[in-house]
Image: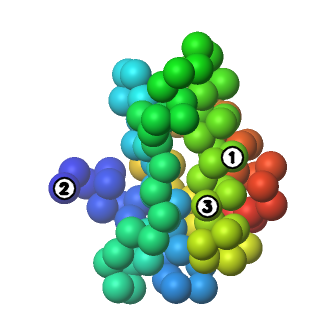
């Protein structure tokens, strides 16, 4: 791992009460997952490559907001978690990452 990623992981750590939300952004898609770092397991994940988003013609910003809303709904229904820790990784907090977070916050999940 790179030093920047290791420094970030020291600061951002999720447990079963407050899991970590990790974001990966590629040129075409955006992926988000909720991770319990104590057990090392992914609890819930969502991405813009899911079938419900394939038929829609939206911009990447709108699509990332929709992914955030879907992810928030999954977390609410499957896990019933209200708080989490956000890990933006190496990405700046603007653009598609910010749009994703706004979509997640609209469902009531707090960081």
Q: Which residue was labeled with disc 2?
A: 1
Quadrant in which the N terminus is drawn: bottom left
| Residue drawn at point x = 39 percent, y = 69 percent | 42
Q: Which of marks 3 and 2 is in front?
A: 3
Could you say which quadrant of the image residue 82 lies in? bottom right
| Residue drawn at point x = 52 percent, y = 60 percent | 21
Q: Which residue was labeled with disc 1?
A: 69
Give the camera-side residue of 67 and 89.
67
Q: Is mark 3 on a helix, strand or loop?
A: helix
Q: Residues within 10 Å of mark 1 (few under 14, many from 20)?
A: many
Q: Which residue was labeled with disc 3?
A: 74
Query: Along the polypeptide, which appears first: circle 3 or circle 2?
Result: 2
Query: Along the polypeptide, which appears first: circle 1 or circle 2?
Result: 2
Quadrant in which the C terminus is drawn: bottom right
Between marks 1 and 2, how big is the CA–CA gap?
31 Å
Q: Is residue 82 above or below residue 33?
A: below
Q: What element carries label 1?
A: helix
Percent position of residue 77, x then y: 67, 69
Could you say which quadrant of the image residue 86 lies in? bottom right
| Residue drawn at point x = 58 percent, y = 20 percent | 56
Could you say which quadrant of the image residue 100 lies in? top right
Percent position of residue 6, x then y: 30, 61
């Amino acid at each position: 791992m790179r030093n920047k990623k290791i420094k970030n992981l020291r600061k951002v750590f999720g447990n079963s009460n407050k899991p970590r939300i990790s974001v990966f952004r590629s040129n075409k898609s955006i992926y988000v997952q909720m991770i319990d770092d104590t057990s090392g397991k992914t609890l819930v994940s969502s991405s813009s490559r899911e079938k419900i988003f394939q038929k829609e013609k939206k911009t990447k910003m709108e699509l990332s907001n929709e992914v955030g809303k879907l992810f928030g709904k999954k977390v609410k229904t499957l896990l019933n978690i209200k708080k989490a820790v956000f890990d933006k990784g190496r990405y700046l907090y603007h653009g598609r990452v910010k749009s994703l977070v706004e979509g997640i916050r609209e469902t009531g999940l707090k960081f």
